[in-house]
Structure formats: C-alpha cells, structure tokens
Image (spheres, grey):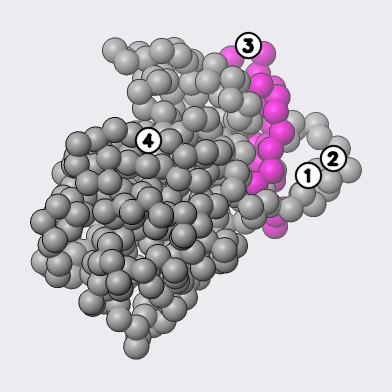
Amino acid sequence: MKGNISGKIILQDGTVFHGHILNNFKATGEVVFNTGMTGYQEILTDPSYCNQIVTLTYPLIGNYGIAKRFMQSRKSFVNGFIIGELCREGSSCHMMDELADFLKEQGIPCLYDVDTRAVTRKIRSAGTMKGIIVPADADEAEIKELMAVPIEKEVVAKVTIPEAYEIPGEGPHVAVLDFGIKQNILGSLSRIGCRLTVLPASTTADEVLAMKPDGIFLSNGPGDPKDVPEIIENIKKLIAADKENNLPIFGICLGHQLLSLALGADTYKLKFGHRGSNQPVKNLLTGKVQISSQNHGYAVDDKSLDGLPMEVTHINVNDGTVEGMRHKELPIYSVQYHPEASPGPDDNVYLFEQFRDMLTKGYRW
C-alpha cells in the first residue's frame, strides 16, 4: 500500500512485532487481545479498554466501516490498536465512515499488517504487559522514554460522565452509577421499561439514596477495582441501606468486582484476562451453558466468598472463574460478563428481566 510507514510494537520484556503505522502516532499502554470475529467498533468505544493497546485476533478489520449507532461511549478511550489486515473500503448499509478515518479522527495509533496471532500467543504465555507502538526507526532514547511512562490508574474518573442526566421511561426509577458504561447496557435497561438517572462515578451513597430510586445499577468500567476505594465505600453504604429499604442492586463487570469487594470478598488479576464474544458461562442454578461477551482483566476470588452471605451462580467453563454471584438474603446480584452484548444472542436477556421483576413485582430468590 502506497505511503506505508513501517512501525513496531515493543513489549516490556523486549519482544518486538513489526507492521505498518496508520497516522504515524505513538502509543503506550497495557497490551491485551480480543478474540471476537466482529464488533471492532464496539471494542474501540468500550470504556473498559481505557489506556490499553488492543490486539484483535480476527485477521480482517474494517470491512463494514463505522456507524454512529454502534458507538458505545462518547469517544474511544483505547491507547492503541493492533490488527492484521486493515480494510480501507468498508461496505455496510449502516456505514457512515471508514475505519481508518475514524482512527485518525479519534487520535488512535494503529499498527496493522501485524501477525496478531503471534502477539496473542505471546500474551497468553507471558501474561499482559506494557507495550509501546513506535515507528520502525525510533531511537533508543525515545523508546526508553515511552516505556518509562507509567500506566495511568485513575481510569474510572477518566471515562465516567461529568454530570448526571436522565433517560425517560414509564417504569421504575433506577439510579445508574457510571464507571464507564456502555450504551448497549443503558439500552437494555430502557427496554425493560426503566426510567434511568445516570450518575457520575463520584456520586456519594447519600446523594444516590436522596433520589429515592427503586433500584441501583453498578456499571462496567476499566481498571483494577482496588484503585477506587472511595467507590467501594459508597457501595458498602448502599448495601447497608439495602438492608432497610430492600433496594435491588444489579452489577455488571467492574460493578460485579466492586460489589464483591464491598461485601468483604477479594479480587485478583488474571494472567491475560477474558476478552471476546465466545466465552462459555455455566449457570449453576439451571445447569445451562450460555455464550457470553466479556472484557475484563480481574476476577473475584471464589475462596474469599467463603463465610460471606454470597453464593456463586455462574462460572466460566474454560477456567472455572467466578462469573456471577448473588446475596443469600438481599436482592443483590451481579455478573462478570456483558449480558447486553447478546452473542448468544438472547442467552442472557433473563438477567435484565430478573432485575425488572425485582423492581416491579418484588421478586426475590
């Protein structure tokens, strides 16, 4: 392709993979991989990928372009994009822009013509690590300087909304704490009839309770859940209030992890995380296996739940990690995966319907 600029991704352990750079941008971040065959726009605009360099294992990216309707947040928060073949001319009835133009507009460094499966094998064996995208002729001083840039930890504050807003609905009122929420989740809550007040992550428990909501939703988001102790303390207060007010609480992804920490459990970092649209999850209550979409690098320690009023409801079929839990006495439950993404396609809709029944019919376990 005319005008190709040679570039490379350098991992923290010194491993190098070569390709071509789009837009001649540089990047630094945690290198992760996603195994989904579709959904590159949803991946690029999912705030849970904040500050990460995302590698896609599927070889051809950009073939259906970009459409506004598939945006999951107000902008992309990824630090870099690594792909195999970049399709320059997409085709779709929804398409509004080419992927290459979108990446340039969003300021996302992209390294293409890369052996992404080799990158994935490296991350799977060595674990996620910092990496940098640079031109092939970058000097050692520049490389050393970029590699020394620390990965930012204040990521929830970076992706949350600056101020509260309402999404109308005729049903029960739900206070949504936005830690980096996806638009598809808000759409799923709206479809079950909820009136939503979407709140910044810094909203205090007292401010939430003063709204007198019928239920509380804890969203997905990026980073290590232990990096936001103030949010964990707020969730503790919401749980304490739940004992008196019987308010249903539903958490997804980061919300699931934060809820577990607030209840006294522990979380840990996975070697390379779960990121893709083909993760099998077993519902221990029904014995059924559902296909799920996932994007997380941390998990709840199942042993830390011993002695707590929680029970594991879902596990990952591949590695046995905790994928869902519920309180034994209170209307509180959460899942690690993304039920709104519908790879099943309707395997996990029941989780939102369960929340609706808790809000409208007083449903309990």
Spatial separation of the CA atoms under disc 3 and disc 4: 48 Å
Find residue 343 and report its horizontal and vertical position in percent: 24, 42
Q: Mark 4 or mark 1, which has the lower sequence index? A: 1
Residue type (three-letter) at the residue carrying disc 3? Lys
State the residue position of label 3.
2
> Is 23 above or below relative to 121?
above
Residue type (three-letter) at the residue carrying disc 1? Leu
Q: Is residue 333 magenta?
A: no
Spatial separation of the CA atoms under disc 2 and disc 3: 27 Å
**Dot 2 lies on which element?**
helix
Q: Which mark is residue 166?
A: 4
Q: Mark 3 or mark 1, which has the lower sequence index? A: 3
State the residue position of label 2.
142
| Between marks 4 and 1 in the image, the one whose residue lies nearer the viewer | 4
State the residue position of label 1.
146
Spatial separation of the CA atoms under disc 4 and disc 1: 41 Å
Can residue 115 be seen here? The reply is: no
